[in-house]
Amino acid sequence: MVSQVDNVITIARPSETPAPRAWQRPFLKWAGGKYSLLPELDRLIPAGKRLVEPFVGGGSVFINSDKHASFLLADVNADLINLYQMLAIVPEQVLTFARRMFTSLNSERGYGIVREEFNAQRIDSIERAAAFLYLNRHCFNGLIRYNLSGQFNVGFGKYRSPYFPQEEIKTFANMAHNCVFMNAGFQKTLALAGEGDVVYCDPPYEPMPGTAGFTNYAAGGFTWDDQQALARCCVAAHERGARVVISNSTAPRIIELYKGHGFDLHHVSARRAISSKGSTRETATDIVAIL
């Protein structure tokens, strides 16, 4: 644009392109976490009064939300929810316990001691929260896995100096007053969703044909019956007035399931982060289904 004032010609500079948004990393490592997909998910998840997450996991989505005033965050993993609740109530006490573990127990023997105490249920809620954070940051690849007896069974990761996520935890704690954390399955959580809510579901992905997948982040796993029940619960929440967004794999029967329930399907590229070697981590296509 050119303008002339007192015989002086000025040329208005075009508006500068806004800087890319800086995304907040979660303080936990989490298989299937959505940090790398945040630009796409932020575009697809609508605004609303409350964000409801029945599979909150590592929390990448809610911690980066600026479209919702409050949050209902649930997961079937009781240790995860205990950690979130303790950080919401007594963050400094959790951090104090965790720092001691990170400082004095960064060894295979120390890891074994913490894991044994954790599985034996001999520690209170605050120390258990700190132990879960320690195990997540010290175990192999941050994998959260339990055996059929409900015991955490991931081996030591052999990291020289595991990162202590103090700043990320402070960011989380500052948001926690707007959050309700609930240890519950998706059916109970979705039954609470209705008018004005936005639901984001990130269930264990349906394995692609010919693969085993990973569905045992909690004892009992996640079956095809669960995938079908989740779709029905989401439809019911939508009928009560909620907007619904689900991430999942492109397994043919998942696509057929969601199309059959009237979801709009969007394809997004996702970087898989479960491999032990960064060079072998793959880019795959996921779907985001929306009602």
Image (tube, rainbow, N blue to C red):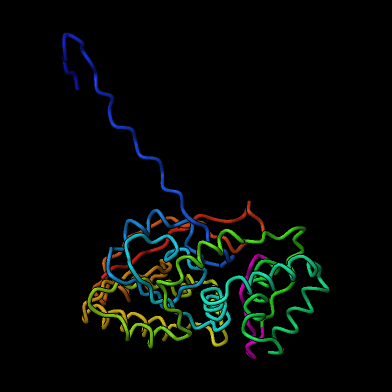
Q: Position of residue 291 (x, y in %)?
A: 25, 71
Q: Position of residue 136 (x, y in %)?
A: 64, 70
The residue that appears at 32% across and 84% down in the rendered structure is: 192
The residue that appears at 17% across and 18% down in the rendered structure is: 3
- Picture quarter containing residue 188? bottom left
Q: Which residues are magenta?
A: 141-151
Main SS category, magenta section: loop
Q: Nearer the viewer, residue 181 or 221?
A: 181
- Picture quarter containing residue 282? bottom right
The mark total stands at 0
Relative vertical location of residue 233 with respect to residue 271 in this rendering, above or below: below
Q: Position of residue 221 (x, y in %)?
A: 53, 83
Q: Does residue 227 belong to the magenta stretch?
A: no
| Quadrant the N terminus occupies | top left
Q: Position of residue 106 (x, y in %)?
A: 78, 66
Task: Judge left or right: residue 262 versus residue 112.
Answer: left
Relative vertical location of residue 118 with respect to residue 98 in this rendering, above or below: below
The residue that appears at 66% across and 61% down in the rendered structure is: 164
The residue that appears at 63% across and 74% down in the rendered structure is: 94
Q: Nearer the viewer, residue 276 or 96?
A: 96
